[in-house]
Each structure stands twice: as structure tokens, then as C-alpha cells.
Image: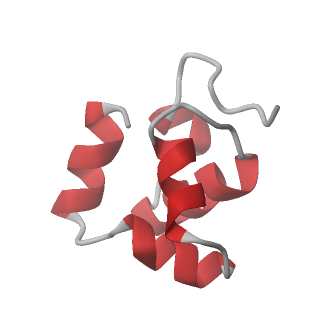
Amino acid sequence: MSRKVKALMVLNGIKGVDIAKTLHISPTTVYVVLSGKGKSRRIQKAVADALGMSIEDLWPNGNNKAA
């Protein structure tokens, strides 16, 4: 997980498990995407929305396209 995303989630009291519950998926799936080992625009959008930011703000290096 990028340091920026992790820090913002901590500062805003948002946990990966919260994102997982919102999307009705496993927390592991969320953490795979947040760690950069997997890609899911749906999960990235949920994180960005929860933080009130855009996907591009959180993943500026083009890591925002689903595989």
C-alpha cells in the first residue's frame, strides 16, 4: 500500500475491512489491491470516495487501471 493512501486512511479512520464490507467482498481482496499486488478500479474508487479524493490523486502513477 502506498504510504500516502495508508496515511490518509489512518487519519480518516478508514480501514480496509470497512471498504470490504461496503463492497461485500473479502478484506483480503481489498488488501491485495492496496498493496499493489492486484488491481481493481472498483476498490480504488471505493477508497478514493471514502477519502473524498479522486483515484488519480491516490494512484498517480497509472496504477489505477484494472487488469
Q: Is residue 66 left or right of residue 13?
A: right
Where is residue 14? Give x, y as percent: 32, 70
Quadrant assignment, res 64 = top right
View extreme (right): residue: 67
Give left or right: position of 46 versus 1: right
> Residue drawn 43% across and 78% down?
18
How far across and down, in percent of the image, does residue 42 sit?
73, 56
Which residue is at 53% across, 23% downward?
Answer: 60
Q: Position of residue 44 (x, y in %)?
A: 60, 50
Image quarter of residue 12:
bottom left
Residue 35: % across, % down:
45, 37
Give the quarter of the figure containing the C terminus.
top right
Residue at the farthest left position: 11
Q: Is residue 12 left or right of residue 65?
A: left
State how many labels appear: 0
Residue at figure coordinates x 28%, y 46% from the top left: 6
Colouring method of the image: secondary structure
Q: Is residue 35 above or below residue 29?
A: above
The single residue placed furthest to the top in the displayed view is 61
Which quadrant of the figure contains the N terminus? top left
Q: Nearer the viewer, residue 54 or 63?
A: 63
- In-image side of 29 versus 7 (left or right): right
Q: Residue at x 59, y 82 (%)?
A: 22
